[in-house]
Image: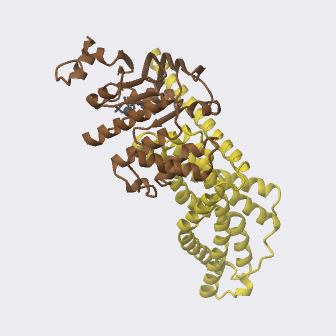
Chain colours: A brown, B yellow
Amino acid sequence: MITLKNVSCKMSGKQILDGITATFNKGEIWGIIGPPGCGKSMLMKLICGLYPVTDGDLYIESENIAGMSEVRLVPVRRKIGMLFQNNALFDFMNVWENVAFPLSRMNSGLSPEEIRLKAFERLKAVGLGGSEEKMPSELSGGMRKRVGVARAIITEPPVIIYDEPTAGLDPVTTSKIYDLLNEIQSRSQSVVLTISSDIIGLRSFVKNILFINEGKILYCGPEQEIDHCTDPVVYQFLRGLDEGPL
Amino acid sequence: MTGKLYEMTANLGGFVTGIFAAALSLFSIAMRTFRGVFRFRGRAQGEVLKQMYLIGNRSLIFVTVTLGALGMVLVFQVCLQINKITGDQSQVGPEFIKGMIHAFVPILTAMMLATRVGAGIAAETGSMVVTEQIDALRMTGVDPVDFILVPRFIASVVMTFVLGVYAMVIVIVAGAFMAHSSFGVNYNVFFVFDKVTGGDLFIGSLKLIVHGGAIPIVAGYCGLTTGRGSEGVGNATTRAVINSSLAVIIIDFIISGVGLLTVQKI
Ligand SMILES: Nc1ncnc2c1ncn2[C@@H]1O[C@H](COP(=O)(O)OP(=O)(O)OP(=O)(O)O)[C@@H](O)[C@H]1O
Ligand SMILES: [Mg+2]
């Protein structure tokens, strides 16, 4: 589904990602972890074609998006639903218009009224029934996250990316969000890539883990086996130790 | 020695390619805006009206006060000087009106709008960049230039023209009032429009329209290339004010020169 071959990204003279090689298949749930600033968000934005790949090949289904023009990227991006780290809700639209926007931009064959109803239904599914007409600025952080989730999944895309879906949320809401993500995933069989710093919560949700440090992959494989990884950075990070290279 | 020379050459090279890249990116935004205008066809009309209202609302009092005051000061100074030489005030009105229409009002209105409208557009688009809203728009297949800049471009062109015409009325009335109250110039003598040619009207309107288009393009470019963080938005806003004012001055200079050589009689 998504294949990265030796993908690198350099911006303003700084190597942000270096030689990333990985494959994410249909139906798989991946957790992307690593220290702050290691390039997790950037990797997701490369997959969306929002930033250019400076070296290597990046395939979405069978298309190599490295060096693709903005116009040709449009249909590729429609296959991806993204929850941004800052939520990125449009502050000039109300909640349901935000959720409906990606769908209204596609040739889905739905009437405006059907799109509105679908947005309302999705908002109810994320526990935000009754807030449809509010503006994003009137919502709490956790509510905004959930609007972001609803917007990422409304088009039922084959690839879903969640950048920090539970950052700043309490344990109860976190577990509710993961339940919701699980339910969406089991229904759609999409590839899910989730970035999170809440390792415990994340590990209960994902089947595979990709560990990045300073733009390089340190671990890429099943979730259970990362405990046996001997890399000192991975070892320290997973156990939250004071002593170590980090 | 060679190392230092190499470093200097490399820096200079980086600077030149930087300027070239910036010019290319500005040009691309301008072209995408023009294309967006031709494909506009009434879509997002509400957005254009809203932006027109915002521009008018932000600038009406500002334009009235500044241009009214400037008109009075200018006429006062001119009349004072003339009193010292010949004392014949009959030509003050006609010459003042002509100069205002083809030269002063277009550049002054545009400079004022560059600070108000330019800063507003840069702050808005810049904060959309840092909150990833621009990325979110691109994810849905929307060109941010089409979506954000085109309505503001249309609104700015229309409103700069409207506010410019309004400013001409204010400046001329304020000037006449000053000439009458301080130097006893009769209103009939002041309000004489025979000096104003078709060329003057054409150049004045052309300037207003071109300035009105240049401001949102330059400001939008500054906003869309915002650096990261809220510091980036601040920088983008400052750059937008400076660069769009500079663009207005340069464009005005060129149109004035071409106008004087072609359609205008001095
Ligand atoms: N637009 C950009 N231009 C230049 N450098 C950037 C840009 N975006 C990110 N970076 C740099 O790339 C590196 C990785 O950033 P990224 O946002 O991917 O980190 P992250 O792993 O998501 O961190 P966090 O866990 O804090 O979100 C950082 O050093 C950052 O400074
Ligand atoms: Mg991040």
Q: Is residue A128 above or below residue A6?
A: below
Q: Quadrant of residue B72?
A: bottom right
Q: Is residue A244 above or below residue B197?
A: above
Choose between B230 and A187: the one closer to the eye: A187
In this rendering, position of residue A18 left or right of residue B259: left
Picture coordinates of residue A132, whole percent (x, y):
45, 55
Q: Is residue A46 above or below residue A111?
A: above
Q: What residue is rendered at 65% in x and 59% in y?
A: B45
Is residue A110 among what the camera can see?
A: yes
Q: Quadrant of the C terminus of chain A?
A: top left
Task: Provide residue A3's location: percent of width, then percent of height.
Answer: 51, 18
Name the quadrant where ligand 1 sits. top left
Residue at 33% over, 38% down: A166
Question: Which quarter of the figure has residue A186?
Answer: top left
Q: Using the rendered view, name the quadrant where residue A183 is placed.
A: top left
Front one among B2 and B169: B169
Residue B135 in the figure: left or right of residue A206:
right
